[in-house]
Amino acid sequence: MAILSPETIGLEALRASEEKYRRLFDHSLNGLALHQIVTDGRGRPVDYIFLEVNRAFEKLTGLRAQDVLGRRVTEVLPGIEADSFIEIFGRVALTGEPVRFEKFAGPLNKHYDVAAFSPRKGQFAASFSDITSQKLAEERLGQHTRELEQKNQALAQALSAVEEARELKRQFLDNMSHEVRTPMNGVLGLADLMLDTAMDSEQREYAEAIKSSATSLLALLNDLLDLSKIEAGRLCVKCQPLNLAETVEAVATRFAARAQAKGLTLACAAAREARRSLLGDPLRLSQVLSNLLGNAIKFTEQGTVAVRVKLVAEETSKATFLFEVQDTGIGIPAEHRSRLFESFAQGDGSTTREHGGAGLGLAISKALVELMGGTIEVHSQAGHGSVVRFTAEFRKSTPDLEALAGALEGAAD
């Protein structure tokens, strides 16, 4: 058995270490290259020479080892690429300070993540990894982000214009409703005075037509004012004592003459629970019922119109009631039902429609029902009548709550 000297052992270890790092160098996934800096007479880097490159370097850069080893970078790369590399790598080789940076190699159209350090004075080692796909993805993401920002800006401008137009429309409706209602009330008052005077049948017919038209126009103006308040978020419901059965019966009584004039039967039914004393807004509830009952009579030529109310849910402090208005009228085709609760929408939008109306009643009714904590829906079939149902929540009445409601009502007035 041969005995190795310490010198031999050290040399073998050195060879093993070199072999290990050679394998690491050759099989690294990153492109690796060792270079010698070339300086001018004043010690400034002016070029560098390729000493070693690995297989990954050849694959990543497209430069073969046999074409670059022993050659200067200025002989391999175009001037602008070589100059930028010389400046950075020269600083590493002369100062010993490592650097890391991203570099785009124009001729190869690739982006690299580059790290460089100096293993010994005048030399540097560089590691290259291809980040082209990542950079392209970042560029696409950046472009997409810029496009989204542009679209968001355009959308914000469009929304601002819509809000401005909506505010102008609200102000117009609000102002016009107030301004026109005053003379309309004057017309109604004068029509009443005319009807109290002696006149022949033809004159009375004209005066009644004036009053009827003025009443319809005033109702339209009130609807427009309510619509303006709804869009501005200023419409609210009050909380004051009310009796649901009495409210429903009062609305039905107001429409009794109209139903009788068309030969219709007008039915009204209220459950026993609806005769309790509750807290809510009788005026807005009457408005919803009037809209629905008025529509039912308008679109019914024969048969029955019915209005009903019953309790459907009850809790400790509140109760929910279901209101139903049913008719045997012309009904609503399926293609028109989805638009019934839109402003200015009607079941028949043709210019030759038989029945008038601005199409605001149901839109306003829906908003009022939602303010009363309920929902509204229509069930109908063309030629077979319609049923409109809505729910509303009411506070249960106690002496303390009634006193509080009265105080709030007085403060509001």
Image (cartoon, rainbow, N blue to C red):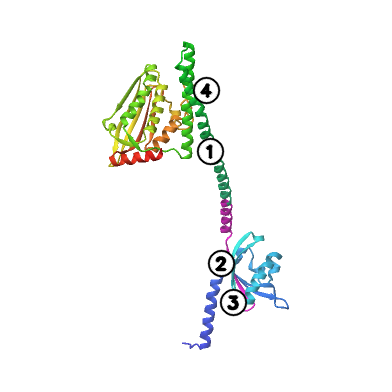
Q: Are marks 3 and 1 in contact (CB under 8 Å)?
A: no
26 w.r.t. 104: above or below: below
* Residue 94 - label: none
247 w.r.t. 318: above or below: above
Determine whether the residue tagged by mark 2 lies in a helix, strand or loop.
loop
Q: Residues within 10 Å of mark 3 (few under 14, many from 20)?
A: few
Residue holding disc 1: 166
Residue holding disc 2: 30
Q: Write down the region rendered in magenta.
A: 121-145
* Residue 351 - label: 4
37 w.r.t. 395: above or below: below
Amino acid type indicated by mark 3: Pro
128 inside magenta stretch: yes
Q: Where is residue 283 drawn, in percent x and y?
A: 38, 32
Residue holding disc 3: 119
Q: Looking at the image, is mark 2 or mark 4 nearer the viewer?
A: 4
Along the line of sight, which residue is nearer the eye, 276 or 393?
A: 276
Q: Residue furthest right?
A: 41
